[in-house]
Image (cartoon, rainbow, N blue to C red):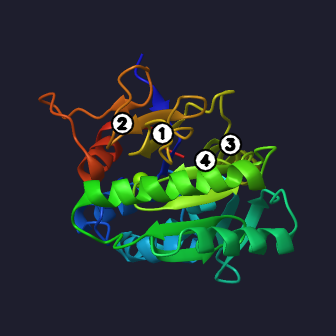
Amino acid sequence: MERTYSACAFDIDGTLTVRGEEYIPAFLQDVMARSCMKIPMAVCTARNRSLAFEKIAAMFPHAADPTYCQINFVFICENGSIGFFYDATTKNYKEFYRVPYPYDERQRQLLFARLKNRLEGKLGDAFLNEISMGFRPLDFNDADHAAVAARSREVAEIIASELASNDPKRTLKIGDSGIGVNVYPADGDKVYGLKQFAAFLTKYRGINFSEKIQEIVVVGDQPQSGGNDDVFLNGEAGTPFTVGETNPDSLYPLPVFDKVGKILEGPEGTAFLLDNLKFKNI
Ligand SMILES: [Mg+2]
C-alpha cells in the first residue's frame, strides 16, 4: 500500500536551493507554501536560526495564509542541536529544545579561537552559534562546486585532527555540508532534531507517529559518509530521500525519479516529492 505522510523535513543548501546558489527558486517557494498550508514542515540545517530564516522567510508570503504557514514551519538549526517555532501571539521565535554543549562556555570559546587559528588562511567565514560553531572555506561562493567541496573537506580534516586531542571522549561531531563545516554536540545531530520535531507535533498538534517516525518525509543532499546529512538520511528516522549525492550501498536515502525515470536533483526533486507523495490532511 502506498504510504501516506504527515510532515516534511528538509535540509536547505542543495535541497531547497540549487547548490551554491543564494535563494530558493520561486517555483519551489510556491510548492512549499501550498504544501505548508496542509502539513507541518521543518528545515533541519547546519545553519543558525538567523541564517536559516534568511533563506526561508521569502516563502511565507507565497502562502494563502502567510501567518498560518509560518506557524506550520519549524526551524531545527545548528545540525539538530536546537529547535524554534513561531509564536504568533508574540510574533517571535521560541526555542523548544536545545542539546547542552558538552563543555563549559569558556572552553567552547577557547576551542573556537583555537580552530580559527589552526585554519588561518583557509577560512572565508566562521560563526560561534548558540551551541555549534561553523566554518566556511575560502571563496565558499565560488561557482566551482567541486573546488569548494575540496576546500570544505580540507577544513573538516584539519578540525578532525584538532578535535582528536581537544575532545578525546568524542563528545563533539563534525558535519561537512560541502560548503562549510559544523562542530556540534554528538548527541544533537539531525536525527535527534527530527525526533524533537515529531515530539513537538505530537505534543502541540496531536499527531502520532510510529517508532521510526516514517510518516515524516526527510529530504537532503549530502548522505555520503562524513556529509552533513549522513545521519539525517540513513533511515534511522523518517523516510529519507536524496536530491544530491547517493549512497548506492544502502536502501536509504531513496533517489527521486520523475515520471519517466529521470533522477531529479536539488529544488526540482524536492518540489516533485511535495507534489507527488501522498500526504494526510492534517
Ligand atoms: Mg545540503
Q: Identity of the amino acid at label 2?
A: Leu
Along the viewing direction, whichever of 20 and 243 lies nearer the viewer? 20
179 vs 164: above or below? below
Q: Residues within 10 Å of mark 4 (few under 14, many from 20)?
A: many
Mark 1: secondary structure: strand
Quadrant for the N terminus, please.
top left
Report which residue position mark 3 lands on. Answer: 195
Task: From the top left corner, tell me how far across and down residue 176 is, in percent.
Answer: 49, 52
For image coordinates 75% across by 62% down, the residue present is 96
Q: Identity of the amino acid at label 3?
A: Lys
Q: Identity of the amino acid at label 4?
A: Lys
Mark 3: secondary structure: helix
Which of the two marks, 3 or 2, is nearer to us in this view?
3
Report which residue position mark 1 lands on. Answer: 217
Along the viewing direction, whichever of 222 and 113 lies nearer the viewer? 113
Report which residue position mark 4 lands on. Answer: 190
Q: Do the residues labelled 4 and 3 touch (CB within 8 Å)?
A: no
Q: Do the residues labelled 1 and 2 touch (CB within 8 Å)?
A: yes
Tell me how far mark 3 sits from mark 2, CA to CA: 21 Å
Report which residue position mark 2 lands on. Answer: 277
Task: From the top left corner, tell me how far across and down residue 74 is, in percent.
Answer: 59, 61
Which of the two marks, 1 or 4, is nearer to us in this view?
4
Dot 4 or dot 2, earlier in sequence: 4
